[in-house]
Image (cartoon, rainbow, N blue to C red):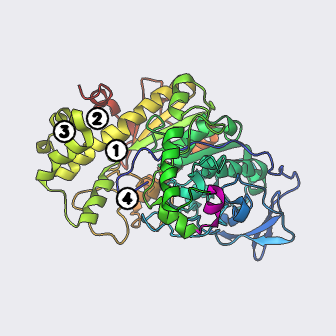
Amino acid sequence: MRIIKSVSLATAALVAAGLGWVGTTSTTAEAVSTKHGEVVGTSLGDVRGTVKNGVRSFQGIPYAAPPVDELRWKSPQPAEPWQGVREATSPGAACAQPVGYPIGVPSENEDCLYLNVTAPAGAKGDLPVIVWIHGGSLMYGTGDMYRPDRMAAAGAVVVSMNYRLGIMGFLTDPSLKGADGLGLEDQQAALRWVRANAAAFGGDARNVTVMGESGGGFAVCGHLASPGSAGLFDRAIVQSAPCTAGSSRTRKEAKADSARVIKALECEKDTAKCLRDKSAAELMEAYGAYADPLPVSGTRLLPVAPEKALHTGRLNKVPVLIGVNHGEERGMVLGEELATGKPMQPEAYEPTIRELFGAKADAVLKRYPLSAYPSPGEALAAAKTDSVWSAPTLDTARLLSKWTPTRMYEFAEPETLWYKGYPEPSFEPGANHMVELAYLFDMELFEDRTPEQDRLADRMIEAWVRFAATGETDWPSFRDGQYVQSLTSGTWKRTEFAKDHQYRFWTTQGE
């Protein structure tokens, strides 16, 4: 998920093969109230969290061993059990990530494989479990920046985790066997932890929904396609991540990308040792702040790319809720304006379209004429939203619905929250990329919600929790006439999604 720069759809994900080492759920583990908070027994030891406003929070629980020293670029290994009660009142460190986007938390820390659990107080082991995979182009972010208290209070156990990012999670080289999907292998380890421990926090370990947005959503696409993820989850929510659009790299592409980094680090000889001798800061500098760390298809972890899996039905067939925002690229175009210090000028529109769309530019300019929009930025955002997000998401829903129950939504609230502390945008950001998260979680990144926006947040959370509990929504499945529900602060109703986003134009290559 990129705010200042445009998002490339090459921020997709694959899921690594499963691990079998996470302990089984103890049938005697139970929550015990204390004056200091809440104590829960897990498969590795007891943890003490906090209780506030009827919600229990446990942060910084290790789900795998620190991937440091000889474990750098190795599959996640078992965390060590502990004696006594471990304090779980603050989140674990952010995984190593460079200075870059506002969604990031600059860090050089590699000891970062921790997760967080939020649950209603008094839950008895039968609530749906939602496992949140944060976005950030698989380069940035942490699980704890998305506070899920409202979602938990609505009747779910919510788990978030940190996972290896960027060069630490997705570097590809023959000397580092299996390192090309470690970030997603970490997610798989966290899912195994959830299966083993959800009941102790009041969740139903047999009813787990994996949920992600943007880079995290592409990770969910990978989980749907990975045989190693089979049996680790029961439903899936994919937000702003069309699985059909560039969700993996070929071996050739991955090796070429890694060769660039290895050359910059002067590690062509004795590559593995040389890379392990480098500091996290040196590695991240060579990798770059805006890389696209895509896992590699055609591997044990991802035998086929998610797009091919959708076409062939080689999927983990669970109910899916998939959606996209009505104006995904509006915030990204505004971010570019903030970076340059001025709105896009009319004379820049046609050259930009020609650079982006090449041979199709004439058709795009005819379909999205500057005269039809209040500003060049809004015209550009419409063309990019429809081509990069809307059409591929509809394709994804169509393919998914052939194999498994599928619901689709479009977040279309016209007046949304802007980023806290940022200058006022030159046009209304609308339902731009990532903004729906401000309604599902409490986030410091965004301005505060109004009472009306709180009501929309409550409705969305209720819908998400209902889907996690039952695999259904209060609107029809996608197969019922390719139904897409529009989510706004007004009446929720069907939207003419294909027509609104010029689907036929984009799927016929602009001809």
Residue located at (42% from left, 57% from top) = 290
495 relative position to 38: left or right = left
Query: Which residue is labeled 1 in the image?
Result: 326
Rendered position, 103 above or below 16: below
Among all residues in the image, which is located at the extreme bottom? Answer: 35
Across and down, in percent, residue 415 comes to 31, 55
Query: Which residue is labeled 3 in the image?
Result: 368
Along the line of sight, which residue is nearer the eye, 3 or 375?
3
Type of amino acid at the residue the image marks with label 3: Tyr
Is any part of residue 168 visible from this angle? yes
Type of amino acid at the residue the image marks with label 2: Asp
Q: Earlier in the sequence, mark 4 or mark 1?
A: 4
Q: Secondary structure at mark 1?
A: loop
Residue located at (86% from left, 53% from top) = 26
Query: Which residue is labeled 4 in the image?
Result: 3
Is any part of residue 471 visible from this angle? no
Q: Earlier in the sequence, mark 4 or mark 3?
A: 4
Q: Secondary structure at mark 4?
A: loop
Q: Secondary structure at mark 3?
A: loop
Tell me where residue 88 sits by quadrant: bottom right
Rendered position, 49 above or below 380: below
Tally of numbered tags? 4
Q: Nearer the viewer, mark 2 or mark 4?
A: 4
Q: CA distance from mark 3 to mark 1?
A: 16 Å
